[in-house]
Image: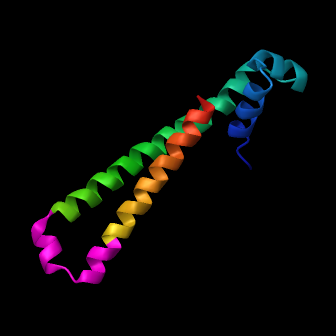
């Protein structure tokens, strides 16, 4: 099943409609609209928490002089690439959450 919560909230805000108005148009309850929208926000926040842990662990690994000195350059490079990917993901998640805010 496709999670339509983010798109629903985005369209609702774009058209300056309340959850109640959308619910009435769709013939469903306002509480159901609210649950759809909250589910995506909760998921994004959970992803951000996991991402923060990924960033923290990778930064600590790269700050460990012993690891950097002893690990093959290719391994250190992979860790640096992972860190950049985690940071890009964080930016993307934060932007998505801000759009829903």
Q: Is residue 35 above or below residue 59?
A: above
The percent coordinates of residue 72 (x first, y second) are 22, 83
Quadrant in which the C terminus is drawn: top right
> Is 70 inside the magenta-drawn segment?
yes
> Is 24 inside the magenta-drawn segment?
no
Question: Dividing the picture into quarters, in which one does residue 5 lie?
Answer: top right
Q: Foreground residue, 70 or 47?
A: 70
Question: Dividing the picture into quarters, in which one does residue 25 lie?
Answer: top right
Colour treatment of the image: rainbow
* Magenta stretch prevailing secondary structure: helix
Left or right: residue 68 versus residue 97 is left
Which region is colored magenta?
A: 64-78
The percent coordinates of residue 37 (x first, y second) are 66, 31
At horizontal 15% and vertical 72% (from top left) the residue drawn is 67
The percent coordinates of residue 89 (x first, y second) are 48, 54
At horizontal 44% and vertical 44% (from top left) the residue drawn is 48
At horizontal 30% and vertical 82% (from top left) the residue drawn is 74
Q: Is residue 95 above or below residue 54?
A: above
The percent coordinates of residue 69 (x first, y second) are 12, 76
Query: What residue occupies the far left of the structure in this picture?
Result: 66
Question: Dividing the picture into quarters, in which one does residue 21 lie?
Answer: top right
Q: Foreground residue, 40 or 31?
A: 40
Q: Is residue 96 above or below residue 81?
A: above
At horizontal 73% and vertical 41% (from top left) the residue drawn is 4
Q: How many marks?
A: 0
């Amino acid at each position: 099943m496709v999670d339509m919560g983010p798109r629903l909230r985005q369209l609702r805000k774009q058209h300056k409609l309340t959850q109640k108005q959308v619910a009435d148009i769709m013939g469903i309850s306002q509480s159901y609209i609210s649950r759809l929208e909250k589910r995506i926000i909760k998921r994004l926040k959970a992803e951000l928490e996991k991402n923060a842990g990924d960033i923290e662990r990778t930064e600590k690994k790269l700050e460990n002089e012993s690891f950097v000195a002893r690990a093959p350059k290719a391994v250190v490079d992979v860790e640096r690439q992972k860190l950049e990917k985690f940071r890009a993901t964080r930016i993307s998640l934060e932007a998505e959450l801000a759009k829903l805010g």
